[in-house]
Amino acid sequence: MPDLEPGKMPCHLAIIMDGNGRWAQQRMLNRIIGHQRGAETVQMVVDQAVILGIKYLTLFAFSSENWSRPRREVQALMLLLKKYIRNELKKMLKKNIRFNVIGNRADLPSEVNQILEDALDKTAGNSGMVLTLALSYGGRQEIARAASKIAQKVQAGELLPEQINEDIFASYLDTSGLPDPDLLIRTSGEMRISNFLLWQLAYTELYFTDINWPDLTINSLHEALWDYQARERRFGKTSAQIIQRS
Ligand code: IPE
Ligand code: IPE
Ligand code: MG
């Protein structure tokens, strides 16, 4: 595989970390073990993203729909999340990572929220990579929440309906301040978005791999990035226009 070009890294990499359950089931293990192994892959990917100079990394860790899973699995995921943040805070401080959360925080248990708040506070001044966890996140809910906030502004006379454009709308989303993802990776062979970043993925390059999340290696991550670097992003223009510009 050719070397990755540092100048062509995605500025914002988003990942749907999928396949923990199947990874475990294929080994006759409990699904929870799959989530534990998945947390180790998260550490590898965060380390790699810093090394590769990726500025924004966004990880789909728990969807608004995942609340419908068996109670024991939800509880185990919340426990794992607390453990992960506690463990990783030191690394985030050392590596100058700014932690960020998107999603409906109000639905999360209060102890989880406290730990998140602590990590958000302590890393708020960091100027390195922005690591965003999507927790209790659903793209449609996020868009509906933004619309509701905008309606309140209009009702209060602080915003005119004709002022609402794409930029204004985006500024009311949870991802306000983050650029749109350049590359989305989904593991485990599923080829769907599952309600992730619906607005933000409008022009994102999509990459699907059959590898289950706990099995993702540095090499397979590099393969995804290499595939991305070989693509031509046209944003509606012709290929000739893109070549002329570069
Ligand atoms: C992704 O793995 C982790 C979460 C959604 C929390 P899954 O738990 O969805 O694994 P599969 O898709 O059942 O294999
Ligand atoms: C999407 O994975 C959510 C996360 C990775 C956190 P799911 O496994 O929940 O998605 P579906 O249900 O297969 O679409
Ligand atoms: Mg899944």
Image (cartoon, rainbow, N blue to C red):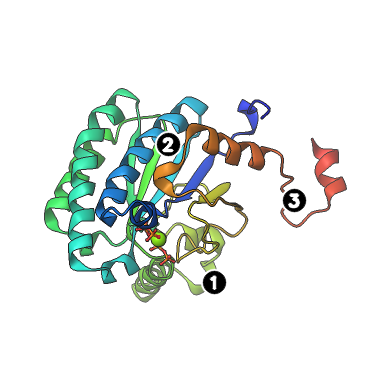
Tell me the distance, in whole angstroms, between the alpha carbons under discs 3 and 1. 30 Å
Q: Amino acid at mark 2?
A: Val
- Image quarter hosting the C terminus: top right
Instruction: Give the mark nearest the N terminus, 1 or 2.
Output: 2
Instruction: Give the mark nearest the N terminus, 2 or 3.
Output: 2
Picture coordinates of residue 57, whole percent (x, y): 44, 41
Picture coordinates of residue 236, whole percent (x, y): 75, 57
Q: Mark 2 sits on what residue?
A: 45
Q: Amino acid at mark 1?
A: Glu
Ligand 1 occupies quarter:
bottom left
85, 147: nearer the viewer: 85
Query: Which numbered disc, 2 or 3, marks the residue closer to the eye?
Result: 2
Q: Which mark is residue 162?
A: 1
143, 222: nearer the viewer: 222
Q: Is 8 on the left or on the right of 184, as rendered?
A: right
Q: Mark 3 sits on what residue?
A: 234
- Image quarter hosting the N terminus: top right
Give the structural element (helix, strand or loop) at label 1: helix
Query: Which numbered disc, 3 or 1, marks the residue closer to the eye?
Result: 3
Please report the residue visible at 29 percent of the width from the left and 36 percent of the height from the top.
124
Where, by quadrant of the figure, is residue 69 drawn?
bottom left
Picture coordinates of residue 156, whole percent (x, y): 33, 72
